[in-house]
Image (cartoon, rainbow, N blue to C red):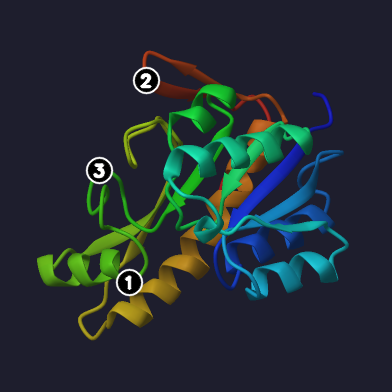
Amino acid sequence: MSKKNIAVLVSGGGTNLQSLLDCQEKGMFGESRITAVISSKEGVFALERAKRHGVPGFVLPRKSYPDIASYSKALADLLEEQKADLVVLAGFLTIFDEQVFLRFPYRILNIHPALIPSFCGKGYYGLHVHEAALKKGVKISGATVHFVTPECDAGPIVLQKAVAVLDDDTPETLQRRIMEQAEWKILPEAVRLFCEDRITVKNGRTYIDNDKGESL
């Protein structure tokens, strides 16, 4: 198991980033470290979280680039400059193209606030996911960590965790419960598994070496 540099991409408050930082401080990732936090917007609180933990923060505003292709190239270049071994999307709401995937194949993890393949794909982000789940009347929802591929929310699934949906839930209360009970648990766990070289991808599926480690 080699030491890995982890880059986290953010666009907002950074609650998932905070869960990663907290787990890092507990030694969950071994010698691997979050070495860069990259935001698609200026002034977001996620950058303040990074600063408090001594992690360099970078801003790469989408509005500074004329199209997705030029933005994607700049993002991939910055990730390579930072020598990122793993890229984690933690509430990163800016689209990028295959340039990033091709330069970081099966090295980009995303957290999605539903049990893929339910409520995923284009348009399913933030509260929209939970609004759709409640409208459908599902009894369980949850979160999924998956590898990022060119097709939205369609990459190999790494971990999932289910969360109960209550009769009086609003999109906001369901969002909070899924973050607390699922996202903040399985995202750090997936990062740990990656850093320990325990995830293998074959034919579009992931296989996890469970000879060691803890259950969620």
Specify whether 151 is left or right of 99: left
Q: Residue at x 61, y 35 (%)?
A: 76
Label 3, secondary structure: give it: loop
| Pointer 3 with pointer 1, Cβ within 8 A | no
Ranked by sequence position, the earlier of labels 3 and 1 is 3
- Mark 3 vs mark 1: give the one in front: 1
Identify the residue at the far front of this view.
66
Task: From the top left corner, tell me how far across and down residue 207 is, in percent.
Answer: 48, 22
Task: From the top left corner, tell me how far across and down residue 154 is, in percent.
Answer: 32, 35
Task: From the top left corner, tell me how far across and down residue 202 is, in percent.
Answer: 43, 14
Above or below, comparing residue 60 to residue 145 in the picture: below
Identify the residue at the far bottom of this view.
168
Identify the residue at the far left of this view.
136
Above or below, comparing residue 162 to residue 87 in the picture: below
Ranked by sequence position, the earlier of labels 1 and 2 is 1
Q: Nearer the viewer, residue 159 or 79?
A: 79
Q: Nearer the viewer, residue 45 or 154?
A: 45
**Which quarter of the figure is the N terminus placed in?**
top right
Q: Which residue is mark 1?
A: 127
Q: Nearer the viewer, residue 106 or 22?
A: 106
Q: Which mark is residue 117?
A: 3
